[in-house]
Image: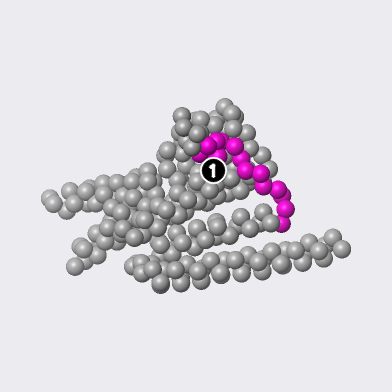
């Protein structure tokens, strides 16, 4: 009777790790007690994302005209959706090289966070499996 | 709103002026550094400053060298086709 409950708890834990890692970059690693990893991931992803916004302005988050980029950008955090809501009317136009660099920076930051989300969930799963093996 | 806060908000609402020149390719370097750092943070089971920095620098160098070779090959092809 205890095994299914433990499995449910494990799935819930993995979901929490994944969701937290998406909400705040590095939070997933913090939850599995990898403090140094969490700090490095948080600082690097936030810095890359902010550099993109600095170069291209918040106009690079374009949920209407640049959907594929937006999908990658929203991997940074669901909070990016709030920026997407601000810019959806086209009040912050950006063109040329600043737009390209801004989009690339913010999207790569999002994809890096996706890598960290997957890594945090995988490590959380691995720890449970190793504990069960012991 | 204070002048500092207004200045900070303004920097994120107006794009920087970056020309489409060869120097703009240098924007690649911070991005490669970020990729190398985050990738190594996910790969290393334990982080010790010196070892982590060494690994990240090696990956950074590898990416830059590989991209430079790729760019050189592509430039050569473009030159051969257009000449």
Residue A105 point in image, percent of width and height: 55, 49
Few, some or many residues within 10 Å of mark 1 (<14, 14–19, 20+) = many
- The residue positioned 71% from the left and 57% from the top of the image is B22
A62 left or right, relative to A78: right
Q: Is residue B15 magenta?
A: yes
Q: Does the magenta stretch include residue B27?
A: no
Total number of numbered labels?
Answer: 1
Q: What secondary structure is the stretch in magenta mostly built from?
A: loop
For residue A103, which quarter of the picture?
A: top right
Residue A18 point in image, percent of width and height: 35, 48
Residue A60 point in image, percent of width and height: 57, 40
Which of the chains bears the disc numbered 1? A
Q: Can residue A49 be seen in this view?
A: yes
Disc 1 secondary structure class:
helix
Who is closer to the viewer here, A69 or A84?
A84
- The residue positioned 50% from the left and 58% from the top of the image is B34
* Above or below B6: residue A28: below
Residue B70 point in image, percent of width and height: 67, 66
- The residue positioned 43% from the left and 64% from the top of the image is B40
* Above or below B41: residue A45: above
Spot the residue most to the right.
Answer: B83
Spot the residue most to the left.
Answer: A1
Q: Give the range drawn in magenta.
A: B7-22
* Above or below A96: residue B46: below
* Above or below B2: residue B57: below
Residue of label 1: A53
B18 left or right, relative to A51: right
- The residue positioned 55% from the left and 46% from the top of the image is A52
């Amino acid at each position: 009777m205890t095994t299914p409950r433990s499995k449910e708890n494990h799935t819930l834990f993995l979901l929490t790790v994944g969701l937290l890692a998406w909400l705040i970059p590095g939070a997933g690693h913090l939850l599995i007690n990898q403090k140094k990893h969490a700090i490095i991931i948080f600082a690097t992803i936030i810095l890359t994302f902010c550099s993109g916004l600095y170069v291209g302005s918040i106009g690079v988050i374009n949920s209407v005209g640049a959907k594929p980029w937006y999908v990658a950008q929203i991997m940074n955090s669901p909070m990016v959706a709030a920026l997407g809501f601000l810019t959806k009317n086209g009040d912050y136009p950006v063109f040329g090289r600043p737009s390209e660099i801004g989009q690339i920076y913010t999207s790569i930051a999002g994809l890096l966070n996706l890598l960290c989300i997957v890594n945090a969930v995988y490590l959380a799963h691995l720890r449970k499996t190793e504990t069960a093996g012991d | 709103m204070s002048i500092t806060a207004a200045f900070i908000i303004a920097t994120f609402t107006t794009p920087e002026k970056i020309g489409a020149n060869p120097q703009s390719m240098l924007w690649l370097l911070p991005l490669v550094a970020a990729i190398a750092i985050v990738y190594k943070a996910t790969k290393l089971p334990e982080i010790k400053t010196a070892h982590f920095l060494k690994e990240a620098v090696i990956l950074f160098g590898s990416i830059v060298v590989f991209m430079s070779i790729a760019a050189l090959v592509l430039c050569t092809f473009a030159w051969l086709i257009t000449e």
